[in-house]
Image: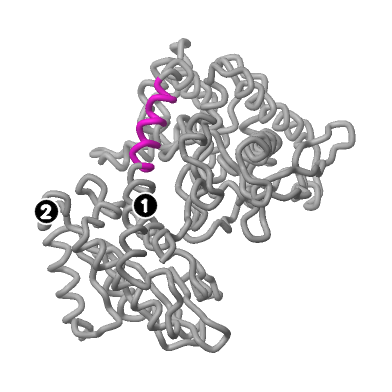
Amino acid sequence: MAQTKIFFSDYFNVDRSVLDRYGAFDVNLVTDLPLFVDPFLLFNSKKKPYQELHERVVEYLRYLKRLSQTPQTKATIKDLYQFSEVKQNWLGYCEFGNEGRGPGPLFARALHDSLNSVLRNFGDENVTKGTHLEKLSLLQPRTGRDSISDFTTNLIKEFLLDYTETFAKKHLDARHCTTFHVKRVAFNYDTQSWESRNYFLPKLRDDYVLLTPLDLLTHDENWINYKDMVSQYHQITESVDNDVARDRINRYFRGQLGDKPKDSDLKAAAAATLRNFPELLDRYIAIQEDRGDQASAISKEKRDEILGIFDTTLREAVRELSAKSKFYETGWNSYDEACERVLIFKHYVEAQDGYRLINRKGTGFARESEVQIFFGLIWGLSDFDVNREPNNGRGPVDFKVSYGSGDKSLIEFKLASNKKLEQNLRNQVEVYEAANQTNKSLKVIVFYSEAEESRVRAILRKLDLDKNPSVVLIDARSDNKPSASVA
């Protein structure tokens, strides 16, 4: 059976070494990978084209700042502040496929309001060496790396299209490419509108694929981020030269604390102080600029770590599953299909060294969504319609597998460490089943320790689910199984 082609290099029949020499990331064409464009890597780069890209981002934000000084219509904010995800680069946090949300209306409104208030010195900073889009995320903690990455990607889209077209014309068979009319490529400041252009690009089904330079990507938080800023609170306040201003800031901080503050109280007080003294944001950014040489090295280290898991181990998984099973062939009905693939995933994790996919260095991933990414990755291509987190008004379910309108099954993933596991097992999937008009579902629970296994088995016995075939436990422990390579 032919190997399923899930990477750009496989699908377009180009040697990975060619991509490596070009500096491009070999994207996965099954689902987005949790890698993000960090605008600080543009700012801090020694490459002049990258520096020019960062200035392009800042120039557009200066333009928006001028607009924000007067009220704008909803249509203007939608057109100029709001962007869709550039899904063709296959990056970000969509756990299946590449249909992410992008920096939507909440991001657009927050950007417009902030540029006219707490970010009013944007572009005219006198503490920092440059201007940084990430400053918005320091005021809006929920404006995370995905939104910042999507916004940046939209503003450097012209560069990415040129970058991909150049590679395609030089290294790809013309049969695998076609000319696409791409909207919102570059902003024309004279007409104050977005321009569309034609590009010769790699074709995947009815859409194009974008390549991204590897050295623009990070896996973890952006170099400038809210969590890091709060953790460096005392260093930030110590950098304030004016003793009167520094004392005022410290008085406010102490005023947020009770008699016996806990660590969480200290973090909350730091966050409140930073919100009320936005000039401290520039102090933090200046500290990160001074440490800028570390940004590329740390981003590369974290990027290499995640790529080692998503790439090398994934290739091994797909190769083995393709050779030993009908994993990438269509099944018989949606529930059988779902069961078969969940059980194969379970077998690979427990018996074929695949636990390393979802247990990095013996420590379970913190979020269920990251486990779901791995399952989505090795689901592969199927004749069944597989949707990630379809929301029918009562909350999203992890996976819905369907074949036509009348054959639907659901798959819900949980970590055994989830504090609401018992509550979810009791009624959550049943609610989803009703919303999706099906009575077929699987509950997949992943545990990482003996204590977690004991807890989940006790819950299942309590709910009389311990012998229910629709509940599947996956043992992702690292302390009870030797590596398959040495067993």
Is residue 428 found left or right of 50 in the rendered image?
left
Q: Picture quarter containing residue 339?
A: bottom left
Residue at the spot of label 1: 315
Q: Nearer the viewer, residue 420 or 240?
A: 420
Residue at left offset 80%, top offset 52%: 75
The segment highlighted magenta reads 294-307
| Residue 56 screen position, x and y as percent | 69, 27
Residue 180 versus residue 40 in the image, above or below = below
Q: Is residue 452 above or below residue 233?
A: below
Q: Quadrant of the N terminus?
A: bottom left
Q: In the rendered structure, does residue 301 fall within the stretch colored magenta?
A: yes
Mark 1 belongs to which amino acid?
Answer: Arg
Residue denoted by label 2: 482
2 vs 1, front mark: 1
Q: How far apart in space, not on screen, are marks 2 and 1 (Cα)?
A: 21 Å
Instruction: Classify residue 2 by image quadrant.
Output: bottom left
Q: Is residue 451 visible?
A: yes
Principal SS element in the magenta part? Answer: helix
Give the number of marks: 2
Q: Position of residue 392 (x, y in %)?
A: 55, 75
Question: As drawn, is 451 to the left or to the right of 305?
Answer: left
Label 2: element kind: loop
Residue 89 - label: none
Query: Does the stretch in magenta take in 102?
Result: no
Amino acid carrying mark 2 in the image? Pro
For residue 275, say whether it is visible.
Answer: no
